[in-house]
Image (cartoon, rainbow, N blue to C red):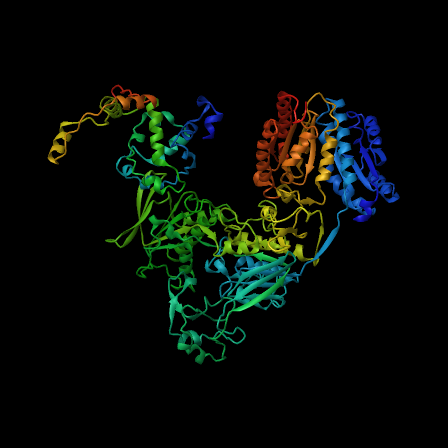
Amino acid sequence: MSVCTMEQPKVGVFLSDCGKQLSEILDFDALTNFVKGVPNVALIARGSEFWRGKGLQTIVDAVKSGKINRVVVAESITKISDVNIAQAVENAGLNSYLVEVLDIKDHCAWPHRNAPKEATEKAKAMLLSAIERAKLLEPIEKLEFPALKSALIIGGGIGGMQTAVDLADLGFEVNLIEKQPFLGGLAARAGRFFPTDDCAICIQPPSSDVKTITHTSRKCVYRSGFGEIPNLNILTNASVVAVEGVPGNYKVGVEKKPRYVDADKCVACDKCVSVCPVEAPDAYNANLANRKAIYINVPAVHPQVYAIDEDACKFNDCAKCVSVCPTGAIDLDQKPEQVTFNVGSIIVATGFKEFDASAIKEYHYDNYPDVITNLELARMIDGFGPTGGAIVRPSDGKPAKKIVFVQCAGSRDRRYNPYCSGICCMISLKNASLVKEANPDAEISICYIDIRTTGREHEYYYERARDMGIKFVKGRPTEIYADEEKGKLIVDVEDALLKRFLDLEADLVVLATSMVPAEGTAELAELLGLDLEADGFFKEYNAKLRPTETKQKGIFLCGGATFPKDAPTASLHAHSAALKAAKFLNSGKIVKDLRTAYINDEYCGDCEFCPVMCPFGAITLEPTTENHFVARVNDLLCEGCGVCVGTCPLNAIELKNSKSTQLAAQMDALLSVNGTSKPLVLAICCQECGHTAVDSSGMAKMEYPANVRIIKVPCAGIVRVNQILDAFKAGAQGVMIVGCKTDGCHYEVGSENAEKKADSAKVLLKEYGIEPERLEMFKMVYIEGAQFAEAAKMMTERVAKLGPLKLMGDS
Amino acid sequence: MPHHNVKKAEAMSFSEEVTCRHGGETLTACYQCGTCASSCPVARLDSRFNPREVLKLALLGEKDELLSGDAIWLCTSCFNCQERCPQNVEIAELMFTLRNIAIEAGNSPNIYADFGGALLADGRIVAISKFVEKKREEFGLPPLKPVGVEDLNKILEATGFTKPEKKEASQ
């Protein structure tokens, strides 16, 4: 860094006229003469284009010759040319961050084409701004961080298992941890899946399973070879208790609860179960039956090793299992173990669970045993379940003939979960059809608000259900009550289509409960430094384009951890998470341009604003002397948005590639030349949506006056109140801050912060005798070019009406 | 409500007219699940009233049918529907809002005109009757005295309360 900063800047300015189209509007001779007069400009070149071909070679040659050490290019398609030029300059031996590209077509020539003189003056200001910035630019170094080629997957349901197979197949060291004693998660309990009607325990086996692998070899978990993948370490009864480290190198503390059965010795002979005298409610089977204190969920689970329920077992007071075990596998003195995993990446696959329907008092889930949930019904349908496949009334064990399903139990309900859980219609259709198929004389009704069968093959389930004679009632029941004389439940519902009140008799009422985040989701989010959405599920980095990534590079999400999912979607999601993790870990290192934030220790101290505001958790506080501390930026985590810069009350943080001195020099330059009859307005635009809205207004040839000057910042959140005041001092008569939409801010909180800051700046402006209307915040996206042009016109008119700005001290 | 600021009353749809009024704000949240209807004790007894249907008519803008009909006056304000509505639609409040709109449009059952007249004249909705006087005597309660209506009328005047017009030959 020192060499270049010491060296006198020699700026090369490359002016593109885009196939002469720009020189028809702008006076290029005037521009050239203007640039010639700017100190430190060592070279001026004009051409048709500079971002590719011969034009780009001109830049490369100039850099190689040593005549210039800063590059300013006035181009027409900056967003593409930026990358090309930077790469070429880097290859020519100059740091790519010593390049400044400006868009004189879309930001100047086109929007102001009907005022060519004014446009030329604005182009001068833009060129000067770019040159002044270029002079102050400093090289940005690249750093390499090691990334361990290993991953930890939290959750052994369908999502976690599929991700584990993918990553293990690709050669990564994979650790899969599951909270329960057996793998499978919620999915395994569902018995059968839609839309394939096959078993829930069926997974795609690893391709490393040479013996059985064929293209179509979908397999039950127990015969999939899943447990024998050499680079897959499976830990059941285990949960995450601590997370430390950085992307590429995490230390994850895991607590493994004792199973009390040694997996290496157990031969799954069932002798222990037959002698165990203790019975306990079988939570796996929705407490519809009891199981022994030593148990296995269903025959085909993984691992094929018994587990002891420590809440029920009498341990050494009984120990009958110990004496009967032929291999001495039972160890009642096992203690919890702490294991630490050192991994490059973490994948969250914690899934979801059924909402506790007892919250809906009028459905009496907690006091009528014959009101059950879909998952409980699924356990009854499962031949390995508590009833051996028979559909019965839990109250008396008699066959259930009349069955009523109630959809949206807790979903689409603003009192509980306002969202549609998305899968419950299909679950009910599947379960109702399975019951009807096995019991053709069952009378089944489904009470629904809207039936949602939006996936491939899904509508078929609805058709088939109607065809089978399942009845559909359009209405959400108000109450389920017990008719004790008849010994039936009554579902009180209006069929809205008939406008008729129905009292549906039922032996069994099945609530299609909403799906909510798995137990411990909030705690895990806290440990991992991840955000949750308002619905309580994990928040993805970007719902549209990066659905399995999080704001923590190196931590990925899959399956129902982000929202309830059916099996096909959970699988897709799992494969996506595996791919993203693999892409992240593949090279064994993370290479990063350090356009990050840095702290000026002289000013920083004893304040906690930046670590709280940083959207990426990149800032920590480090003690200095007793009771004093300073902020520290983690280069790996920092995304270079500058939200911290805008937050710091002491101006103690700067971005390496967007320093306040650089911004100030640009501002001065942009406001040094007016050349129009209108008051100067400075538009501070974030490089994301704000700046692209300016691009698109120009691309679409929308007009706005040339007195509006654009300055680009990484994020609107970087703007400081004193910079706004500086803009007015530098000659701006009005200031616009243009950022992303609040929800669409690329750095989460930047746009929102900028808005708050604009509000407080307005108060301050008033104190200084400046009309607060001279400052306005706008939020736009790329397609809102017209809105930008409108806003620019509006601000110009508004400021013109206010008259010239009088600053304190002005006479 | 936002609509109030941006649109003039004549440009509003009926559902907007309802949602910009106090008590009517939640109308558009209704998705016609019918929980209100099956919760309603009146709907079981009188086919002229079904809260779900009232909301649907309001959403579809069937203003005349709603304002001139009997339905909105049959709600007993038991709030069963409102308690159970999964969308937190303030159904019972909406009935009051719709009644207010109806009264402003000159549509109200004659008994409301009687109530209004009694309120202006005696400060009571229900005039003191022989039956009430006799019952009070039986229970050992003192006879009701006329209340001064001067102050009350000032308040009513300030709030714009007028006696609803009686409809001719309404049935």
Image spot of residue A490 (x, y percent): 30, 49
> With respect to residue A354, does B90 lie above or below?
above
In the rendered image, the residue lying farthest to the top is B168
**Image quadrant containing the C terminus of chain A:** top right
> With respect to residue A745, does B163 lie above or below?
above
Of residues A630 and B40, which is closer to you in this image? A630
Q: How many marks?
A: 0
Image spot of residue A398 (x, y percent): 31, 60
Of residues A246 and A721, which is closer to you in this image? A721
- Residue at image x 44%, y 80%? A323
> With respect to residue A485, does A65 lie above or below?
above
Q: Is residue A586 found left or right of A777 in the rendered image?
A: right
Image spot of residue A684 (x, y percent): 66, 34
Looking at the image, can residue A402 be seen? yes
Image spot of residue A681 (x, y percent): 67, 28
Q: Is residue B103 found left or right of A8 in the rendered image?
A: left
Quarter holding residue A449: top left
Of residues A352 and B24, which is closer to you in this image? B24
Q: Is residue A30 found left or right of A210 in the rendered image?
A: right
Of residues A466 and A685, which is closer to you in this image? A685
Looking at the image, can residue A746 be seen? no
- Residue at image x 52%, y 59%? A157
